[in-house]
């Protein structure tokens, strides 16, 4: 059985859409559950996604909440489902939220006991009792990361980036000044469904804050509610041994050493689902960076995986040598921190609202500017993350 899940995007977290999908796909009778965040294919329009997957489905589940009435995609999906004469099953908290043209369908109330809700949902779909997964060791690893991973977000200045992919695809000719991308926009790009299966390469000189950047990404994944089903694996590239085994086995050995690949299929499934995020730090420090880069590109293409790589600009030559037209990759340059970003950080980090005033933040900013000029006069490299750490102590 194939199922199409329709819902307003704003309800995805509160109503545990991904967990419902994972539960249903674990049942023997259900082959797959189509949902937007995972099943959008590169180059596919939203209309094609709706039409193709609704047509291929045996059942349409629609989540009705107070937000549904304002969701144009849900309204369109219901219309397409009716056009294909598909059975629609509502999930709801209040029956008044269900559209009038669907109210005759037998639905399932969404209750506070999630396990009971899942049991009821599956029984109404198939008439059978549901089964539940044993605890996943990779999610246990995530819980341990959440408790033990140390990163002080208040001491971190979120940088800006520049997408320089086009520079390489146009034979190195930069015809216009490329725009900057904020850290928050990069986060959005990273988790966009269309970004899956694309190699993301972050480049900057040594000491520019690449390692802090991926640590900040890991922190965000571990602490943002909407990313609670993602598992970030921060790995030093030099620790990956690719001489004796495939890349998947190398990842496994790094994440779950001495387990004799007992949970190999767990990791493989997590990668294929798009929930595993590999943050590979220091590609340029690997003994065989070009060989690893090729393997990473093939791995991402094969598993539709999510990988962020950091490296020094020396890797640019490898990229020019290896990546040809048609290769799916994104190359980003980690830029210096703009004055406005630094000032914003000072205000946010130092302003305790009652004790610190805005003019004090300006004084701190002036001190910082003096430090930067002193370092530049003496020929020292200015590394802003380090200055921020000094200023925070």
Image (spheres, rainbow, N blue to C red):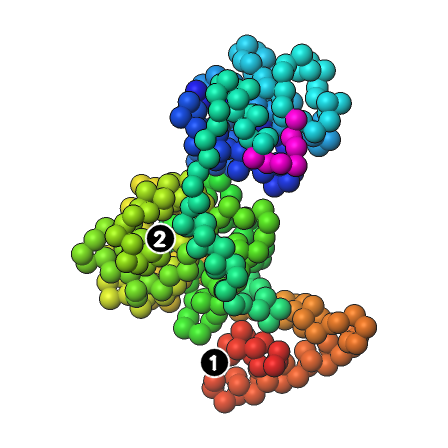
Residue plotted at (47% across, 40% down) = 194
Give the x, y percent position of residue 120.
Answer: 57, 25
- In the rendered image, the residue lying farthest to the right is 354
Q: Please give the range of residues in magenta.
A: 109-115
Residue at image position (52%, 59%) is: 146
Viewer-proximal residue among 201 and 259: 259
**174 in relation to 63, above or below:** below
Q: Secondary structure at mark 1?
A: loop
State whether residue 12 appears in this view: no
Mark 1 is surrounded, within 10 Å at the Cα level, by few (under 14), some (14 to 19) or many (20 or more) other residues, namely few
Q: How many marks?
A: 2
The first of marks 1 and 2 along the sequence is 2
Residue 386 located left or right of residue 109: left
- Residue furthest left as drawn: 244
Residue 107 image offset from top left, x and y in percent: 63, 20
- Mark 1 highlights which residue? 381
Q: Residue at x 30, y 66 (%)?
A: 238
Residue 178, compared with residue 301, is above or below; it is: below
Write down the quadrant of residue 197 in the picture. top left
Cα gap from disc 1 to disc 2, whole angstroms? 30 Å
Query: Is residue 6 magenta-colored?
Result: no
- The C terminus sits in image quarter: bottom right
Tell me where residue 253 sits by quadrant: bottom left
Question: Residue 171, which numbered label?
Answer: 2
Helix, strand or loop at label 2? It is loop
- Camera-nearest label, 1 or 2: 1
Q: Residue at x 73, y 76 (%)?
A: 361
| Image disc number at residue 361 | none
Residue 195, x across and y down, in percent: 46, 44
Is residue 114 magenta-colored?
Answer: yes
Residue 28 x/y as whole percent:
40, 26
Q: Nearer the viewer, residue 60 or 212?
A: 60
């Amino acid at each position: 059985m194939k199922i199409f899940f329709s819902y307003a995007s704003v309800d995805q977290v509160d109503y545990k859409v991904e967990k419902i999908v994972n539960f249903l796909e674990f049942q023997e009778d259900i082959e797959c559950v189509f949902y937007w965040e995972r099943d959008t294919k590169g180059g596919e329009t939203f209309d094609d996604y709706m039409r193709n997957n609704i047509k291929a489905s045996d059942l349409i589940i629609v989540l009705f909440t107070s937000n549904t009435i304002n969701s144009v995609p849900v309204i369109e999906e219901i219309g397409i489902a009716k056009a294909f004469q598909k059975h629609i099953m509502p999930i709801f908290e209040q029956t008044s939220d269900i559209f009038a043209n669907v109210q005759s369908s037998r639905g399932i109330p969404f209750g506070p006991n999630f396990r009971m809700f899942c049991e009821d949902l599956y029984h109404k779909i198939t008439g059978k009792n549901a089964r539940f997964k044993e605890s996943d060791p990779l999610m246990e690893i995530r819980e341990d990361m959440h408790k033990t991973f140390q990163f002080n977000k208040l001491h971190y200045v979120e940088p800006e980036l520049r997408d320089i992919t086009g520079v390489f695809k146009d034979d190195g000719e930069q015809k216009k000044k490329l725009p900057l991308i904020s850290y928050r926009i990069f986060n959005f790009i990273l988790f966009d469904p269309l970004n899956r299966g694309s190699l993301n390469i972050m480049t900057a000189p040594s000491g520019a804050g690449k390692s802090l950047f991926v640590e900040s990404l890991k922190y965000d994944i571990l602490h943002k509610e909407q990313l609670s089903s993602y598992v970030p694996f921060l790995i030093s590239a030099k620790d990956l041994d690719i001489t004796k085994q495939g890349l998947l086995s190398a990842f496994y050995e790094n994440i779950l050493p001495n387990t004799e690949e007992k949970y190999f299929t767990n990791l493989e499934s997590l990668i294929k689902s798009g929930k595993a995020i590999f943050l590979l730090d220091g590609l340029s420090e690997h003994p065989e960076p070009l060989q690893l880069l090729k393997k990473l590109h093939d791995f991402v293409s094969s598993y539709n995986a999510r990988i962020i790589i950091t490296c020094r600009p020396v890797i640019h030559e490898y990229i020019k040598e290896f990546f040809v037209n048609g290769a799916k990759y994104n190359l980003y340059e980690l830029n210096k921190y703009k004055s406005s970003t630094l000032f914003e950080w000072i205000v946010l980090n130092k302003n305790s609202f009652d004790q610190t005033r805005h003019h004090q933040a300006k004084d701190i900013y002036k001190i910082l500017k003096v430090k930067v000029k002193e370092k530049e006069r003496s020929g020292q490299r200015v590394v802003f993350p380090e200055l921020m750490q000094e200023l925070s102590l």
